[in-house]
Amino acid sequence: MQTQAKKEIDTLISAQWIICVDDDNRVLQNYSVAIDQKLIIDILPTQEAKQIFRPSTQYDLPTHALIPGLINAHGHAAMTLLRGIANDLPLMAWLENYIWPAEGKWVNAQFVADGTRLAIAEMLAGGTTTFSDMYFFPESAAKVCEEAGMRAQFCAPILDFPTAWGSGPDEYIAKAKQLNVEYKNHPLITIALGPHAPYTVSDPAMCQVLTAARDTTMPIQIHLHETQFEVEQALQNAGNRPIERLQKLGFFDSEFALQCVHMTTLNEGDMAILADSNASVIHCPESNMKLASGFCPTKELLEHDVTLALGTDGAASNNDLDMFGELRTAALIAKGYSGDASAMNATQALRVATINGAKALGIDHTCGSLEIGKEADIAAINLDALNCQPSYDPLADIVYNCQANQVSQVWVAGDLKVNHGKLTELDQYALITTAKEWAAKIKEGMSAQ
Ligand SMILES: [Zn+2]
């Protein structure tokens, strides 16, 4: 009897559940994901997979669910070094009295490299495979990310005033363009323009951002309608709502896919602007609640087919980068705020944390779901935990009761970044030591004031 030669591939992952987050929201039992040359080349019953493939590495995960790696679509990675520096304050008091002074004193290329490395380690260990970052010295953050092999979008910050990173809009935009040239063909990293917020970027600088976006096709991410105060101030000072101002300037034109972070204060007109454009909303519920900023009406946004993605925001206002916690908070707050228990159901919530993030960042052709032809960005979650037993519905378990420490393996583009719950490359203990050294210096500086 002749047997056909098995096909040699890099990796075969066999799991109890595969939660694809594809268009049909398939949840497959006893299936395997076959990976070769970074790509998912097949998703098929495990019995069949073992007859067809000869993998270099095989993972048998009989009590696990595979999900697409989580996508943290908004944050300030290096702010991990300011985690917990000021708590229980509203946004402006928190920024003006603590964050901006600390940043003014300490932020440099080394701070950003060390803080970003810590953030990447925390995110990878918690099942996040892609993040978006908006912070000073993005060239340092991007370098650290490149070394760690994580997928990311780096938004070069743009403000009217000088910072340690640059003198003003001209220089910030020039640096963004230069970075974009450097990373143009990078397999994991994209560069975006990050005008900080309507209240820190004037109209002329906003227009410069649009021109740069048009010239380079760089995406744009902005904090928008973070608080009611921001909207009221704009109405008082300029006579229109921040979203209306940006619309008049052209940010919602069809050539752009604006990434709007927060969007807590929305009326019907605002909703119409979002629904009629390619814009996405990046919801950061824990940061919004911690700073008492307000509530993003996620139920209505989903009903209007606005792409809704999820972010943790910086660790200084969250205070962690745990996307499982964020995912659960988003699902619960959608129900609590709308008074409708069906708002953001479990399937929708997992989409918000995966494929919708990929859509918002413009990388959904590459990642965000487990489908043949996409790159293998995958998190394996061990459901054999006390808080997940018994398990009637693995997808609901992941949204409502799973914890980040149940993440056992993580792959980014087929590369194993976490194995048996431990980082494969980054040294957790060295990262903790470095963070403690920074905190000692920053604390000393604060007490000397
Ligand atoms: Zn933010």
Image (cartoon, rainbow, N blue to C red):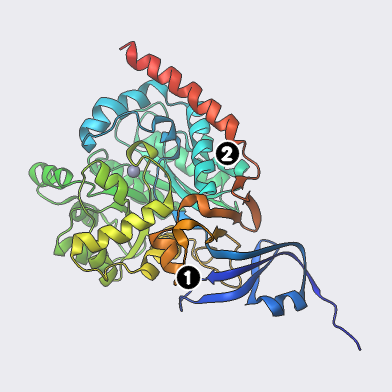
- Local SS, label 1: loop
Q: Quadrant of the C terminus?
A: top left
Comes first in the chain, label 2 or label 1: 1
Relative placement, left or right, of 261 versus 91 is: right
* Residue 379 relative to residue 296: left or right: right
Q: Nearer the viewer, residue 106 or 222?
A: 106
Residue 270, image quadrant: bottom left
Task: Give 72 or 437, whichever is nearer the viewer.
Answer: 437
**In the rendered view, would you say 90 is above or below 358?**
above
Q: Quadrant of the N terminus?
A: bottom right
Give how far across and how far down residue 209 sits, in percent. Answer: 35, 47
Q: Residues within 10 Å of mark 2 (few under 14, many from 20)?
A: some
Q: Residue at x 81, y 75 (%)?
A: 6
- Residue appearing at x 41%, y 38% in the figure: 135
Q: Position of residue 232 (x, y in %)?
A: 11, 45
Q: Position of residue 428 (x, y in %)?
A: 58, 36
How far is disc 2 from disc 1 in space, using C-alphas?
31 Å
Indicate the quadrant where residue 302 lies. Answer: bottom left
Name, please, the residue furthest toward the bottom.
Answer: 1
Q: Secondary structure at mark 2?
A: helix
Q: Quadrant of residue 354?
A: bottom left
User: Where does label 2 land, which residue?
Assistant: 143
Amino acid type of the residue tagged 1 in the rendering? Val
* Quadrant of the rendered image holding ligand 1: top left
Please tell me which residue is depicted at 44% across the width and 23% down the height of the picture. 439
Q: Nearer the viewer, mark 2 or mark 1?
A: 1
In the drawing, what numbered circle is on residue 110? none
Residue sitting at x 21%, y 45%: 293
Residue 84 visible to an observer of this rendering? yes
The reply to whether callout 2 and callout 1 are in contact (CB within 8 Å) is no
Residue highlighted by disc 1: 21
Residue 280, horizontal then vertical, whole percent? 34, 60
